[in-house]
Image (cartoon, rainbow, N blue to C red):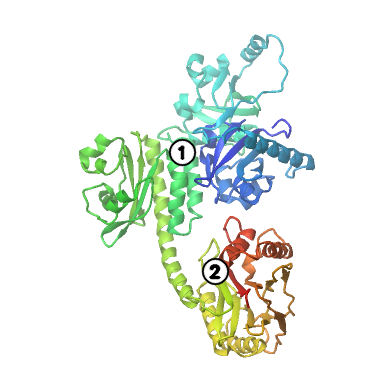
Amino acid sequence: MRRTGASSGALYLLDDATRTLCLAVICGIPEDVTSPWRRIPLAAPAPVTDAVRDGRLVWMGSQDAMARAYPRAAATLPYRLTLAAAPLTGRSRRWGALLLLWPASHPDTASDRERANITSAARRITRALEEAPQPPLVPEHPFHIPVTGSRPRRERPNQAAADYAERLPEGAVALDLEGRITFLSTTAAELLGLDAGQLLGTRPWQSLPWLEDPVIEDHYRSSVVSREPVAFSALRPPDRPLRFQLFPDVSGISVRITPETGPGRPGDDPPAAAAGRTAQAGRLYQLVHLAAGLTETVAVRDVVELLADQVLPAFGADGLVLSTADAGRLRITGHHGYPQEIVDRLDGLALDTALTPAGQVLATGAPLFFADRAEMARGYPKAPKISDKAAWAFLPLVVSGRPVGCCVLSYARPHVFAADERAVLTSLAGLVAQALDRARLYDAAHDLAHGLQQALLPRSLPRLPGLEIAARYLPASHGMDIGGDFYDIIRLDATTAAAVIGDVQGHHVAAAALMGQVRTAIHATAGAPPAQVLHRTNRVLADLESDLLVSCLYAHLDLSRHQVTIASAGHPPPLLHHPGCAAEVVSLDPAPLLGIDLGSPYPVTRLTLEPGSTLALYTDGLVEAPGTDIDRTTADLVRHLAAHGGEGLDLLVDGLIRRVWPTGRYTDDIAMLLLRTDAAA
């Protein structure tokens, strides 16, 4: 932080078991401010996760840049600041990430020196982690490093500073970075309405009921995170408005308090009325953070994973059961922290069950909270015997007055649910209900479309003497998990076969349906010369009057002559490896995609397949990785094929895919077909 001028810093460690980044060290920022970001799933979109996954420095020069690139993170960090996240990547593992924050006054772009200092610091931290006798454990609470100010200290400054503050006609208050009052003048105590002894060591929004507004605490958060001056007004009951001005630096915050005598200044917040508003900003930030996460869930499994990864830690719970109403019964769609035998016992209970409160909660639409086992036993004697949990929150999931399910959070120890926690959990239940209802509709549509696609892909590939085959189809990690990628092996006679691979434009049901029609057209003409097969398929596509384009590669294999004849319609060229030789990208004459020009010629390329040769066919989803050059990616695959060409085909095909997509988060569908001739032929 000193070397880069950062105002705050943090260190995240990667928990490999849960694939989660855990906040381990903080400096320059209060611990309670970090509650929404203490545990971040590695798959979540955030600067620190991208830094770890991609192994690169992530720089966000402004809040606007953050909102564009990471809207979910920006919603839970709504302050003007500059941010950098650097990966901690060692020789054999990923340790986590270094996070640095600068005040809003920092330039949007990083200088070369700043980048060098950040990456150098990340390397030093990584080296320290790797040289430690034992890998560090993720702490339950982040380790807090105090900020050491660089301001010179003079002899006996305390009394002189206090005398100076006492002579001012306005109130003077000093807060540390945790928000606690470390000094206040007599005038400040009079304006706030309490003695200094009652205020020192407390946070103003905790010791003064009329400041118990989440907006007030947010002003403090904004000041301490962005390091910018903040001004606002608040109403001290019954009718005395006060103006607060906050001036932060690395050591704390100086607060100036003056009576508000005129109308509010333009841009000021209205005076805060404390009546009935006791919710804490920390809880509200948790709700905003979780709401932003729920908007990104797609399938039911995504909802369950988000609840397990973020809701449970946010509320200190360790057990989750998510159930939906189905034909008069509660069907468990997801769970965490329960043995399978308990889940099996709870699955399928009637809605009017007296075993647990879930049915009653769903019928009434009102949540139920049980602080301990005795409280639960009074209404449901059998419920505490089901598991070893000691406290429960039963939250109804209702959408537009229609019950869709029940969410149960459970605790290993007794847990008193404060009023603000109950309010936030109840609000959260409404968000979960909408996300779950939307996810169920998605899953239903996905199952239908996925079933269609699987029915159109070959169930099994034929066995051909002298030819070994391995194939993979991997859907994109996001979206409907369906698309138009296809492959096929068509046996023509005892020694000849056709290998086909293609890609229909799009990721929807129409693409999958057209893929099936293209496969049928190829089957109908298979055995003809490759150029004719593509030409006839092109005519069929024109008759279908589809707006979608298709890339396709057709290879005629003559195993008796050890030859392959290839024609391509705008498809990526295959890779070829001969035993003992360097692998290569097969050079093909270009031709347009199917569906563009009925009169297009399709040039053919003839190759010799020596015994033991491997031919790799693939769709563009394999090599079109974001932020990478296709030619460089293809060259990397060629090197991998040359180095591992002797492996079994199943190992080889998986290794080629992992070479480009080590995390398995594919941005496009991938189809791959490996063919190897018999080495003994």
Q: Residue at x 52, y 71 (%)?
A: 508
Mark 2 vs mark 1: which is more N-terminal? 1
Q: Are marks 2 and 1 in contact (CB under 8 Å)?
A: no
Residue 540 % position (x, y): 58, 88
The residue tagged 1 is: 283
The residue tagged 2 is: 473
User: Is 144 located above or below residue 164 in the figure?
Assistant: below
Tell me: 377 left or right of 27: left
Residue 427 % position (x, y): 40, 46
Where, by quadrant of the figure, is residue 587 drawn? Answer: bottom right
User: Is 330 located above or below residue 445 in the figure?
Assistant: above
**Residue type, label 1:** Arg
- Marks 2 and 1, Cα distance to the nearest angstrom? 44 Å
State the quadrant of the C terminus.
Answer: bottom right
Is any atom of residue 547 visible in this view? no
Mark 2 or mark 1, which is nearer to you?
2
Q: Residues within 10 Å of mark 2 (few under 14, many from 20)?
A: some
As helix, strand or loop, the secondary structure at mark 2 comes to strand
Q: Residue at x 60, y 42 (%)?
A: 96
As helix, strand or loop, the secondary structure at mark 1 comes to helix
Tell me: 306 left or right of 633: left
Residue 562 % position (x, y): 66, 81
**Residue type, label 2:** Tyr
- Residue 108 badge: none
Q: Residue at x 46, y 50 (%)?
A: 306
State the quadrant of the N terminus.
Answer: top right
Q: Residue at x 79, y 43 (%)?
A: 112
Residue 623 % position (x, y): 66, 65
